[in-house]
Image: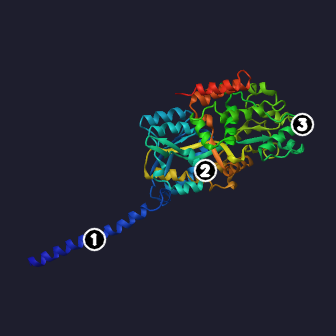
Amino acid sequence: MKTTIWRIALLVVIATMCLSACTAATEVPTQAAESSGSYLERAFAGEFDGTVVTMAGPFVDSDAVKFEESIKDFEEKTGIDIQYAGSKEFEASISISIDGGNAPDIADFPQPGLLETQVKKGKVVDLNTFLDMKKLQANYNQSWLDMATMEGPDGPIMAGVWGRVNGKSLVWYPKKAFDEAGYEVPETWDELIALSDQIAADGDTPWCIGIESGAATGWAATDWMEEIMLRTTSLENYDKWVTGELKFDSPEVRKAAETMSDLWFKEGYVYGGRQAIVTTSFGDSPKPMFENPPKCWLHKQGNFITSFFPEGLEAGVDYDFFYFPGIDTTYGEPVLVAGDIYAMFNDRPEVRAVMEYFTTGASVEGWVRAGGAISPHLDSNLDWYSNAVDRGVAEIILNATSVRFDGSDLMPGAVGSGSFWKSMTSYISDSIDLDTALKEIDAAWPQ
């Protein structure tokens, strides 16, 4: 009897051990399946359903609505709740949050220089640790990746990925009058100068230029300098210039300033002449294009400038734009840009998935279709754009041989929004000469 009971007990133990082993055997493949694929693929498989990712940025009002609408499909398909908080005081508040140990999972920086400050402190997650760099290289112009690579305490890291962007390398013109006059859109710098000469020979003024902007007077001149730097020297020199390694009082920067001066100061080339450039508001400067007949014909500015055009004008009919041509073919067809770079501060699987999502055109498709956003992603589609202006700007950016961010926005504030603005304004108004202006800007660089 005791033997029988002992045998039964032994069989129960064996059965229990077998059941545990079998259960474990079935659980391991399941866990492996859940962890296979990229973080984005795992998110779409539902692995991170019910998680929350916090995000902070400068998008407010209609921009915030468009951003949230653009990520809604991702949230519904993955179950990840991206809780976005926008602020008009983002630049100040984000630093307080990060330094106070309360950083959001992801932050959107409209100025890479502000992000770089946090990278130097070691606060930013290196995206190289989990993103597939080959996929990134296939979906971005290499220049975007170069600009996202920043120096941390232990060496360079991939500090962020680019979302919404804007293009600045555009020249606007009054299309209807332009076509009636028989003018043709230039494709090279020589053709642009020839067109300017032709307009002047016809008794008109080619260029509409104004740099007055209250306390920010001069910023429009810095944009021109940045455009010309990209077209007359290497990307390496442009990057060194932005960091102060290449001085303003250098042959490369001087050449850019002189190239701009040759166009701006040429007799009859700018509406109102040299003195009017400094006193004319940047927003008012293109308006004479739309008088009948036009008082000036060409205006270089980013795509935001259309909001300053007179009401009732139709894109593609009353006005149009073309790419601001390259100067030296050695440096290709660069584009000066602005935009938003998304950085990661808390490393969790669901945050990784969201960051991977932001590397795809799908992350901004909804915003692109709603208007007001340009995608830097090569997998985006020009058919997404609902208006000719956005579509044309997107095409220029996607076809660029290289892109670089607004240089003055990357420089220390004492220079980028200080001496650079001020000294260029003084030079353009003829209060000081170019030598003095360049030396003044260099002298303001923080030691």
Would you place residue 114 above or below residue 5 in this image? above
Residue 363 at what x, y percent from top left?
Answer: 58, 52
Say which label, 2 or 1, has the lower sequence index: 1
Judge from the rendering whether residue 74 lies leftward or rightward of residue 373; answer left or right: left
SS of the residue under disc 3? helix
> What is the distance, in whole Å, between disc 2 and disc 1 at their CAs?
50 Å
Amino acid type of disc 1?
Leu
Residue 176 in sight:
yes
Residue 402 at what x, y percent from top left?
Answer: 64, 48
Count neighbours of disc 3 (C-alpha within 10 A) and say few if under 14, some if 14 to 19, many if 20 or more. Answer: few
Select label 2 or label 3 by which is in front.
3
Select label 2 or label 1 by which is in front.
2
Judge from the rendering whether residue 251 lies leftward or rightward of residue 265; answer left or right: left
> What is the distance, in whole Å, between disc 2 and disc 3 at their CAs?
46 Å
Residue 220 at what x, y percent from top left?
Answer: 69, 32
The residue to which callout 1 is attached is 19
Select label 3 or label 1 by which is in front.
3
> What is the distance, in whole Å, between disc 3 and disc 1 at their CAs?
94 Å
Say which label, 3 or 1, has the lower sequence index: 1
Query: Which residue reaches farthest front?
Result: 251
Say which label, 2 or 3, has the lower sequence index: 3
The residue to which callout 3 is attached is 201
Judge from the rendering whether residue 379 lies leftward or rightward of residue 271; answer left or right: left
The residue to which callout 2 is attached is 364
Residue 280 at what x, y percent from top left?
Answer: 76, 27
* Scheme of image coloration: rainbow
| Residue at image point 75% right, 31% down | 261
Number of dots carrying numbers:
3
| Quarter of the picture holding the N terminus | bottom left
